[in-house]
Image (cartoon, rainbow, N blue to C red):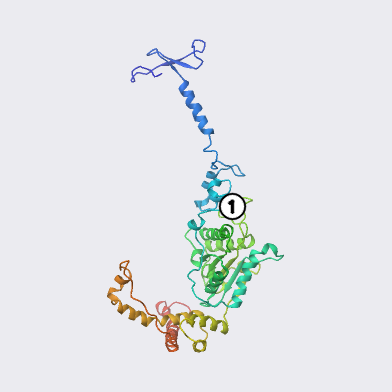
Amino acid sequence: MACSAAPNLRNLRIPIPPNISSSSSSQLFCVRCCCISSNNNNEKKKKKQQKEVKKRLSSQSSWEAKDAEGRDYLYRLGEEADNMNISVGQRHGFIDQVFVGNFLGQDSDIVFDYRHKLTRSFQYLQGDYYIAPLFLDKVVCHIVKNYISHLLNVKVPLILGIWGGKGQGKSFQTELIFQAMGVEPVIMSAGELESERAGEPGKLIRERYRTASQVVKNQGKVSCLMINDIDAGLGRFGNTQMTVNNQIVVGTLMNLSDNPTRVSVGQDWREADITNRVPIIVTGNDFSTIYAPLIRDGRMDKFYWQPNREDILNIVNRMYEKDGIARDEVVKIVDTFPNQALDFYGALRSRTYDTSILKWVDEIGGVENLGNKLIKRRKDESLPVFIPPEQTVEALLESGYSLLREQKLVMESKLSKEYMKNIED
């Protein structure tokens, strides 16, 4: 009951002893307006609040479910460093089974393909390419050995280091093998091995490794982690200094090699948190620039790739086969330009397109209208048909000699000596 006294006057209330009051509940007597009020409303509010605290969100909710250490999901989520662990929300006991789905397993994630697609499927590799048998055997053997390592009574290196001269097709041959085997790898480059934040590249490697493991577990596909040009990111050249991130990346790869099934991205360890072992493949030009304990035989199985004459002829022949170039003509081209990397013959073929492309530019209106035709055209407006040039041995040889002249100029000019005269030879 509300007091009827004026609001600008102070109401003085005194408690009525229980032996005087007829009610069992405590009551107050207002000396200003002689009214009696009860504390029943306050008691009801307290009981309601206590009841709400004890009440769960729902009978099916697992937000308040405790883990083995007595901590709930929200506590663990807030404890995560930068909240980068995508696996927490997939764990059994933290997310309701109605969202996880028993048919997919306890650690499944039905939006994995859409939320965290870091793998490569190689759909752009169209055509019949040649895979060197020696290269194929080495990569296949390494992948299979890692997937059945628990059946072998030998120590299997986790990392395969493919190294050799520039432009010899190390990454491309590996991708062709992945496509042939149906492997869906997670691919990194040397540019991701450095960051303005200390420790970020090492954590990224662990996250990508766990992602490849999740591909195996959730999608049922063979996967691996591949790092291209690792010596460009970790190698030491001349007087270059090793950064903190270089040290952490080396330490991370060494730790993965020694403990491939226990990979942390910052969260606390749990006994059930076992990562599937997936192989790691790295490419580079000179592994002598990398920290020696990382490339020791127990951690890294090394493979030097130098295609022989037969490999070069077969690869170039498949490259020129669609252009109608016979194998004996391919032999003539290879013999004319010996000691060249495989990418030289691809660049040679690309150089033959230059004249046809310039002719096509003139047909669509010249250089002045090039931007409007390429970028600002209407959706229903198509570009004029480009007719590829007819490949001949003479055109390929002419392009090859042009590339040789450019190589010679680069090696002989050395304009850096003119610009920086204090440089050492």
Q: Is residue 42 above or below residue 133?
A: above
Q: Is residue 95 visible?
A: no
Residue at which label 1 appears: 105
Q: Please name the residue shown 40% across and 16% down the image.
A: 12
Q: In the orientation shown, which residue stands out farthest toward the top?
A: 20
> In the rendered image, which quarter contains the N terminus?
top left
Q: Is residue 53 above or below residue 253?
A: above
Quarter occupied by residue 300: bottom right
Q: Please name the residue shown 59% across and 74% down the image.
A: 136
The type of residue carrying mark 1 is Gly
Q: Where is residue 203 in the image (x, y as percent from the top left)?
A: 54, 58
**Viewer-nearest residue: 51 or 19:** 51
**Viewer-nearest residue: 192 or 185:** 185
Q: In this view, does 303 lie above or below 31?
A: below
Q: Please name the residue shown 54% across and 84% down the image.
A: 313
Q: Position of residue 256 (x, y in %)?
A: 61, 61
Q: How crowded is mark 1: few (under 14 residues within 10 Å), some or many (20 or more)?
A: some
Q: Can residue 282 be seen in this view?
A: yes
In this picture, residue 364 sits left or right of residue 317:
left
Number of disc labels: 1
- What element does badge 1 sit on? loop
Q: Position of residue 250 (x, y in %)?
A: 57, 64
**Viewer-nearest residue: 252 or 411:** 252
Q: Position of residue 161 (x, y in %)?
A: 59, 70
In this picture, residue 307 sits left or right of residue 405:
right
